[in-house]
Amino acid sequence: MNKDLLKKRYKKEKRFILIGRIAVSLTIIFLVILLGSILLRGISGFYTTNISLKTNLLEEIIDPAQNKNADEIFKASWRKVSRTAIYNILDDYNDSKNIEKSTRKEKRDFIRLFSRSSEFYVRDYTLKNINNIGEVVTINVPASSLVDQYLKGKIDINLDESNRPISDAQISWINFMVEKKMIEKKFNVSFFSNGDSRNSEEAGILGAMVGSFLALMVTIIAAFPLGVMSAIYLEEFAPKNKFTNLIEVNINNLAAVPSIVFGLLGLAIFLNFFGLPRSSPLAGGLVLALMTLPTIIISSRVAIKSVPPSIREAAMGVGASKMQSVFHHVMPLAIPGILTGTIIGMARALGETAPLLMMGMVAFIVDVPQSITDPSTVLPAQIFLWSDQPERGFEEKTASATIILLGFLLTMNALAVFLRYKYERKW
Amino acid sequence: MIPLPIYFIIFLGILSYIFGKNRSKKKITFNKNTGGQPSHYGYYCLIWVTVPSVIFFLLWQVSSNHFIDIATINSIPKEILPKDVTLQKLLLENIIIVAKGGKSLAEVPSESVDYFRKLKFISTVASYSSTLIISLIFCFLSFRKIDPSLMAKNAIERFILSVLFISSVVAILTTIGIIMSLIFETTKFFNNVNFFDYLFGLQWSPQTALREGQVAAEGAFGALPVFAGTFLITLIAMLLAGPIGLFSAIYLAEYASPITRKIIKPTIEVLAGVPTVVYGFFAALVVGPFIRRTCESLGFSASSESALAAGLVMGIMIIPFISSLSDDVISAVPQSLREASYGVGATKSETIKKVIIPAALPGIVASFMLAISRAIGETMIVVMAAGLSAKLTANPLESVTTVTVQIVTLLVGDHEFDSTKTMAAFALGITLFLMTLLLNIIALRVVRKYREKYE
């Protein structure tokens, strides 16, 4: 009888361990699915499709005055030049298939294979190679996101023609261009050098990255000194009284206040009361600073606390004042720990979106911000904006931008871990 | 752009340091009884030269704009001056644009533009000159004070201590700022909307905002469906994260080998470091459509912005909050309790169930409360994956809305700040703030009490 009971109990024991294992593996599976699904969708966004366009840089359109004046050339009808080149490809296709002439609708569909900014590529190329005017040159222009997505296999061509964004004719045109080796896959430079755009093939994250950088600079300049100084005060100088206790409780509670409430604070105080410019990295960075302040204070206090009292006593023993013992002896030993905490706080600030939504930093902004008062957006806000776009190409861009953001976060956290291991001391 | 006087102050500060140091060397014979090293006297002068004048300059900059604005509005001829405050502000902004050399779409009175320019000029000149005078006066005074009786080092340390104290007060100021800004707008909101209608009303349609002269659309600001949506999503999240987080914590604390623990614990914590916007994207892109397709293949309809999708992804997000804290409290249960239990013949799982969990229960409850407060305050996941329509439903496949979603939709892209709509966002904000604050205070209390018990 005892044996049966024992068996039962052992079975229960095994079941219990199994549940634990399942829980842990589920968590890890979630993590893998989360990161994996984004990686899978985003990696292809770092590549883009270009079409080489044989363009006749006709002098009578581009430079009728024949004086090679850059300002006048700039104003020429570039759309006409690029359209002619694009229709030439269509004519080649028609010749190869023995088709008489394309209809107007076909022409319009064909134009859709090219980025709307093709004409600017032709223009910029010509302005750089001003001596080539009058010649036939090959210029690489970006394909539209339709071609890009099709060639990356992201469009299900087994669907009925009316249910997919790409028509049969467009597919055969693309295949024709692929056969003629006019299409090439290239590293997507413009993704890193452009600001936001309405065309998914033109949209880049430079503006958002610069915005994030500027906002983080404001955050670190505002939050780091304040946080470290209040940590020093609370850990080393604060008398044990009710007010100190109030500050401590307050900091712990601030750390758990939802980030969106900080957004409301920023909206009411920084934007409406102090009149800081809307959507600026200055206002956004200050809100993030208030948000990360508790994190920095708490981790700095831990770092200062971990310096053993003997260091302070030895300094005071040779005649240093309390202030000197703290600034000359305790702080140098606590700095690595403080930096670790600060970097982790900054990483959190970098990924934060909700309070910046309130500050107007989620907006369509094409220009790359030049200063902390320019309107700008930040990386997570850019991700949020793009994820809302109905156009297919933006889904890939969103995932690519997410990969960049996660890459930055990973680097920052790795740096923090490195600092911790390198300077960790056991006293 | 750093204004001119700042350069001057920096320059004067450096000079005063050098001269103060030299002067102290001449006037004082240094021994162990003097009030500091020569450099302390230098810093003493530096602080007096720079700090008061910089503070004065900044205060002037911040406050003068306000006064100039009021004076400019008063200068606008009565015939043109609009009655509405927002329109007044708009006109003022246009005046400022024109005064700075830009072009304005609206017509602005030229005398006000001139007046604004004049005020601005006077203010600039006055602030620059008085800042310079203040720094010079303090420079002179601090030089005069250098003599053997001055305890320069103590004075500097007192100054540093007060700077340290002031920076620790910033945290309190932040809280006061949060509470003040929320309360200020919220009281205005409750002047228009009955408090009980807000808390218990069943209809939430803030887009039909109340305006002057409009028949009050009663019940438009009943927030109960919004709260219900928040709790539904939080409940789903906790149903996922609670068991998984707790069992992971138990496994890691009690069963896993030190190496497994060392690898798996940080891996789980990666989940806490992923930005919420990434979770939101994941929910909208992968989980939402997946749930919709599954439901469709099973034969019932689900919206692709379902409470279930948002809740599940939020659950994944809060797993590490529960598992880390629970792990800590389980590990903190004294070994003697375990050994006593093994001693009377209990298996490991029996010990955990009958001894360790009850002992660690307060801490575990606290970790759940912190996780709930996280879930209630989470914004991006629900903004991207939950819906906008405030429906009172318990069906997780329908789309619901939450407090944070409503705050965002009410405030984003809205420039007009005095409508009931924007004030409603602040009312929701203070509700959210109080809910999370309550949960946090209780949880922190419980954790502290529990720690004291075993230490």
Image (tube, coloured by chain):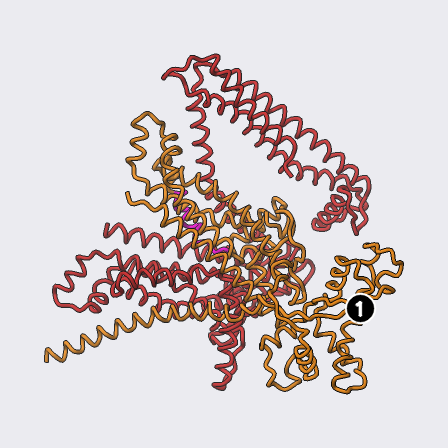
Chain colours: A orange, B red
Percent x, y of residue A170:
69, 80
Residue A134 highlighted magenta (yes or no): no
Q: Is residue A202 above or below residue B145?
A: below
Name of the residue lying farthest toward the left: A1
- Image position of B275 (left or right of B205): left
Percent x, y of residue A69:
84, 54
Residue A247 highlighted magenta (yes or no): yes
Indicate the chain on which mark 1 is placed: A
- Do we see residue B78 in this rendering? yes
Name of the residue lying farthest toward the right: A65
- Image position of B453 (left or right of B217): left
Q: Looking at the magenta stretch, what is its main secondary structure?
A: helix
- Do we see residue A266 in this rendering? no
Percent x, y of residue A332:
39, 38
Which residue is found at the position 28% from the left and 73% from the top? A18
Q: Nearer the viewer, residue A238 or A301?
A: A301
Q: Is residue B259 above or below residue A219?
A: below
Which residue is found at the position 49% from the left and 82% from the top? B295
Percent x, y of residue B127:
66, 30
User: Which contiguous range is marked in magenta?
Assistant: A246-259
Which residue is found at the position 46% from the left and 46% from the top? A293
Q: Amino acid at mark 1?
A: Asn
Mark 1 residue crowding within 10 angstroms, few (<14) / some (14–19) / many (20+): some
Query: Which residue matches tag 1?
Result: A56
Tell me which corner region of the image, top left, top right, bottom left or bottom right, holds residue B15: top right
